[in-house]
Each structure stands twice: as C-alpha cells, then as structure tokens.
Image (cartoon, grey):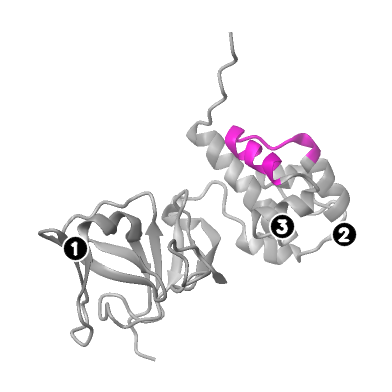
Amino acid sequence: MPKKKRTCDEAQQKWFEEVLDRIKKATGARTQVQLAEVLDVRQSSISDAKRRCSIPAEWFLKLYRSHGLSPDWLHDGAEPVYLNSSKAKVPADTVLRETPSPYGRMNSRGRVVAVSTMAGADTESEVWEPKHIEELSIPESFCLPNLHIVKVDSASMEPVIQRGAFVGIDPDQKDHPDGDLCAVYFPHQGLTIRRVYLQGDQFMLKAENEKYTDLTIPAEEMAQRTVGRVVWVLQNFTLL
C-alpha cells in the first residue's frame, strides 16, 4: 500500500514558520531563491520542507558552518544566537529585536513582511504580481498564509483608508459581499481598492472620496480581476 502523505498540524506549522523566520533574519535571505542559495539546496527542497513542516538536520549544520548560528537558537529560539560570532552576517541585537517572542500572546509577537506597490511587478500583465519595495513589522495575528501587503498610493478611499496606509489583502477570499473592501486589478493601472456592489450584470467599485468617480466591471470579469479582500489596514490618522 502507498504511504500516507504526512500532514502538518497547527503546532508543527507554527514551529516550522518560526524556525524559517529565524533563518531568514539571521542570514538576510528574504526570498525562497535567496534562502536556497544560502542553504546550497534546490528550491524544491525548501518546498518539500514546507510541505512536511520539517527542517532537515543538515540545514542546521550548514548554517552553523556558514554563519556561526546556534542550532538550539534556530530550533527553539534559545540564546545565544551565535556559537561562532566571527561568522555572523547580521548583528545579534538586530536578529533578536525582530524575532517573535515564542511564548507571548499573538498580538505581542511580530513578523517582518514584504510590502508591494499597488502597481505591481508588471502593469501590462493580465495578472497582478507583487513588486516588493520595503518591509513592515506586523502582529503575528495579522499574518495569513498567502497574504499580500501593499502601500496605498491613492486617495480614492479617504478618509477610510489614507494615502500611504498599509493594507493586508487575502487572496484566498475572493467573494464579493455588498459593501466589502476588495482589491481589484486593472492592467496598465495596477490595483485599486474600493467597496464592491453587484448591480445586475456588473459590479460597481465605489470610492469613499467623492472626488473620485466610481468604476464598473462586467460580472463575468470580476473573478479574474479580483486579487482579494482587504482584511486589515495600518495607518496614521494624525495629519503631519
């Protein structure tokens, strides 16, 4: 009989993500390509590890030899960060400042995530792909498996969403309940965030700011254009 594929429970998934976060912060690797280069493995090996929620033992050994990192710190966050500090690529105080507290409440633990422009990687593409421009530390509870984070460059949703706000978009939620905030992509223009309403055979994308006109999309195109629903907003309401 074929072997059953190993599945990750919530605790294993949480442990794996925390170990991977520590590896990324201590090595400066921000993407899977960079991580594969640091570990000298194929990208498929990282994908396999993610699927199993398991870190191969040889990764810990490689990171000790290349970066002086303590296997105990990588495995469970127990200091010190380095057993051989002469090989450190990132200052220990920086790594520890960014590392999530392993036993704190969800909102007391943070994670550094990539932020994209609303234009994305290629405005001529039919599909929106993120283009990372900076990083942001957010509460652990704000993180979702496939979350996109964008920096708003439009005033169309003011005062609800200010220009310069950071917005979390969940691409796994693409339903359109009337009045919900959705991120919708237009080729050559990029993302727009609007309240969405179904009207007959089309959707209306309504702006909060009366200076901006409402947009419409044929209902049959909406699924393709929708990147996801807005699940949170981080912004400063104080006028500077």
Q: Secondary structure at mark 1?
A: strand
Mark 2, other Cα within 10 Å: few <14 / some 14–19 / many ≥20: some
Q: Which residue is mark 1?
A: 203
- The amino acid beneath tag 1 is Phe
Image quadrant holding the C terminus, namely: bottom left
* Structural distance between the alpha carbons of marks 2 and 1: 56 Å
Rendering coords of residue 127 (x, y %) = 44, 61
State whether residue 112 is above or below residue 56: below
* Side of 197 relative to 173 (left or right): left
Q: Which residue is mark 2?
A: 87
- The amino acid beneath tag 3 is Gln
Rendering coords of residue 212 (x, y %) = 23, 84
Rendering coords of residue 218 (x, y %) = 21, 62
Mark 1, other Cα within 10 Å: few <14 / some 14–19 / many ≥20: many
Give the residue at the far left of this rendering.
Answer: 200
Q: Which of the marked residues, 3 or 1, is nearer the chain's N terminus?
A: 3
* Side of 202 relative to 59 (left or right): left
* Side of 220 relative to 53 (left or right): left
Residue occupying the point 74% across, 42% down: 72
Q: Secondary structure at mark 2?
A: helix
- Residue 40 or 81: which is nearer the viewer? 40
Q: Is mark 3 in CB contact (under 8 Å) with mark 2?
A: no
Q: Which of the marked residues, 2 or 1, is nearer the chain's N terminus?
A: 2
* Side of 83 relative to 173 (left or right): right
Residue occupying the point 65% across, 37% down: 49
- Per the rendered image, the range of residues in magenta is 43-58
Q: Nearer the viewer, mark 3 or mark 1?
A: 1
Q: Magenta stretch: residue 154 in it?
A: no
Rendering coords of residue 30 (x, y %) = 65, 60
Q: Is mark 2 in CB contact (under 8 Å) with mark 1?
A: no
| Predominant SS along the magenta part | helix
Mark carried by residue 34: 3
